[in-house]
Every structure is written in C-alpha cells, then in structure tokens.
Image (tube, grey):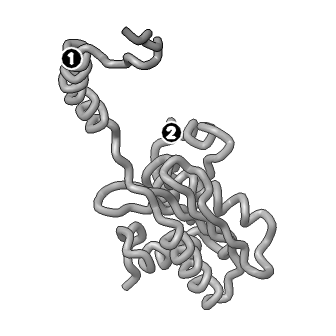
Amino acid sequence: MAPVHPHQNRSVPVAYRLMIASAFMILTPYTIQAFDELPREAVLPIGHTVKAIQASLDACIKDGYRVSVSVVDRAGVLRAMVRADGAGPHTVDSSRKKAYTAASLRRPTTEVAELINKVPTLQALREMNDQVLILGGGLPIEFNGEIVGGIGVGGAPGAHLDDACAQAGLNAIGAGQKVPATK
C-alpha cells in the first residue's frame, strides 16, 4: 500500500458539513433582522445642495444684497458654502451658523428668535454651543416630513430678507415652505 501524504486526505466528514450548514441557516434570520433594525436616513444630495445655494444667491444678488449662503446636512456638518463677490467676511460664519441652528433645532431661526423673545427662560438656547446663532436667515431643509439639513443666508440688510433668499433656495429644490409667502 502506498503511503498517504498528510495533505492528500482533506475530506471533511459529512456530519461536520451538516453542522456548519445548520448553524448558518439558524443564524441567518438574526443577521437579516439586525440589518432591518438599522435606522434609515435621507441624505441631501450634493446636486440639491448646489442648486439651493445658487438659487438663494441669485435671489439676493437680484435684490442687490451681497451675502454668503451655506448648506449643512442633518447633523449640522457643512455640505457647501458660497460667498458672493463683495460679501463681508462675517457672512461666512453667520450663514453657516444659521444653517446649523435651523438643522439642529429643526425650525426656522426667525421662529426660534421670536420664541426666545416671548419666553425669556429660553435665552439659554443662545448658549447651547458656539455653533448656534439665533438670528433670522436659517431654514431647515425638509422633504416628506424629514429634516435632511439646513440652509443659512447672511448679509442681507435684515433677517426677513435673509429668510426670503433662503426660501428661494428651498423652492428651487422642491423642499417644504418655511417662510410664509408674501402677499
């Protein structure tokens, strides 16, 4: 009889194969269930981001305002920002912070500012962190009832004008109306 080389006989017993297959079949539903339980979040596409910024910028430029426009995602992380020619350097931070505040608090920053004026105990919201700016011009970006980000405009001569330019950005991408339409 010829000697058997130790690496020649690699057959796995049938019982062992059945045990592995059974374990796989038993554990598969748990893996699928765990995957199904992961949260799902809508993401604002970069194309929508750029379109919203451009529409906001165009609306302000048309009215003679030199502004900056920022868009953040749902977590308040900057997606994109544009500073118009001649816009003040302070408008960069104000637009980003307004967008952050709108996304974080899930409401227009003008609404938050009015609420703080009516309910003085809410003044602490201003000190929540150094990214919050309670000043009109920030709007949440909402699709189908889900907040996916925020847009902020800074630099127009009045919060209501910043709001109007930000709303032009929302209108351009079909996001929910946040500023009451003017009559």
Give residue 75's position: percent from left, percent from top: 52, 47
For the point 46% across and 14% down, which residue is it? 5
- The quadrant of the picture occupied by the C terminus is bottom left
The relative height of residue 102 versus residue 125 in the rendered view (above or below) is: below
Q: Residue furthest front?
A: 1
Instruction: Describe the element under mark 2 as helix, strand or loop.
Output: helix
Q: Say which residue label 2 marks.
A: 122
Find residue 160 and report its image quarter. bottom right
Q: Nearer the viewer, residue 29 or 161?
A: 29
- Is residue 160 something one can see in this rendering? no
Q: Say which residue label 1 marks.
A: 14
Q: Nearer the viewer, residue 9 or 54?
A: 9
Give residue 11's position: percent from left, percent from top: 32, 18
The amino acid type found where label 2 is placed reads Leu
Q: Nearer the viewer, residue 128 or 12?
A: 12
Instruction: Describe the element under mark 1 as helix, strand or loop.
Output: helix
> Which badge, 2 or 1, is on the more N-terminal residue?
1
The relative height of residue 138 versus residue 33 in the rendered view (above or below) is: below
Mark 2 or 1: in front is: 1
The amino acid type found where label 1 is placed reads Val
Q: Nearer the viewer, residue 182 or 32?
A: 32
For the point 77% across and 81% down, which residue is it? 85
For the point 48% across and 71% down, which residue is it? 48
